[in-house]
Image (tube, rainbow, N blue to C red):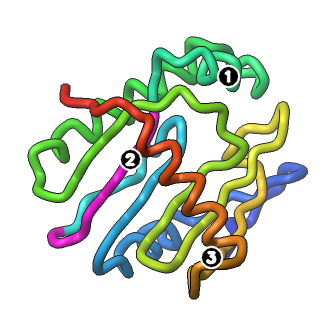
Amino acid sequence: MPPERPCHRRGCWAILQTAWRNHYNSATEEIDILAYSAHFLRAKTGVNVRILGDPESRVVAARGVEEGIGAEVTAARVKNALALHRPLLGVHGVEIRLHRTVLYNSLYRADDQILINTHAYGTPAANAPVMHLTHTNDEGPASTYLSSFNRIWTTAQPHNQ
C-alpha cells in the first residue's frame, strides 16, 4: 500500500501525491481509471490509458450531496478533470469515456497494480480507505474489480471533446 499522508482529521486516509505518481510511473502497458473525477492523471508514452467519468450523471450529483459538498461542486470537479484531460485525447492509446454508473469504489490501475478507493456513504473519497491489490491470475479480488471496470467500459459513451 502506498504511504499514507499524516493527517489530523478523523478518518483521513489520503495518499501522498508521490505515491500516486510512483503508481502511474510504474505502468509500462496500461492505465485504467474508474472514478467520477481524477485530476492527477498524467499520460505516459507507450501506455494505453482508459478513463471513465461523466459530469452530467445524476449519480455524480447524488455523490456530491452525500459527501456534503453539493451536487454542483462534484459535477464541476468532473468537468474540470475532463478539461484537464482534453489534451490527452489526441495522444495515441488514450481513450476517455463517459459513464453514468453508481460507483461503489474508484479504481486506479497501473498494469497489474490496482488501487481501490472504497466509497463510504457521506465520506469524501479522499477520506475513504484505499486498498492495494495485485492482479496475478484470472481469479481473486483484483480480477473482480477489473471485470467491473470492463463491464462499465463496454457500456460507456466515447468522450470526444
- Residue 139, above or below 161: below
Q: Is residue 132 left or right of residue 50?
A: right
Return the mark for residue 2: 3
SS at badge 2:
strand
Q: Earlier in the sequence, mark 2 or mark 1?
A: 2
Question: In percent of the image, x 52 and y 47: which residue is there?
Answer: 151
- Check disc 1 and give the amino acid type: Gly
Q: How crowded is mark 2: few (under 14 residues within 10 Å), some or many (20 or more)?
A: many
Using the numbered discs, state the Cα–Cα distance from disc 2 to disc 1 in whole angstroms: 20 Å
- Where is residue 146 drawn, in percent x and y? 55, 63
Using the numbered discs, state the Cα–Cα distance from disc 1 to disc 3 in whole angstroms: 26 Å
Using the numbered discs, state the Cα–Cα distance from disc 2 to disc 3 in whole angstroms: 21 Å
Q: Identify residue for label 2.
A: 51
SS at badge 1:
helix
- Check disc 2 and give the amino acid type: Ile
Q: Identify residue for label 1.
A: 64
Q: Which of marks 1 and 3 is nearer the N terminus?
A: 3
Q: Which quadrant of the figure has residue 110?
A: bottom left
Q: Which quadrant of the figure has residue 145?
A: bottom right
Circles 1 and 3, Cβ within 8 Å, touching? The answer is no
- Total numbered labels placed on residues in the image: 3
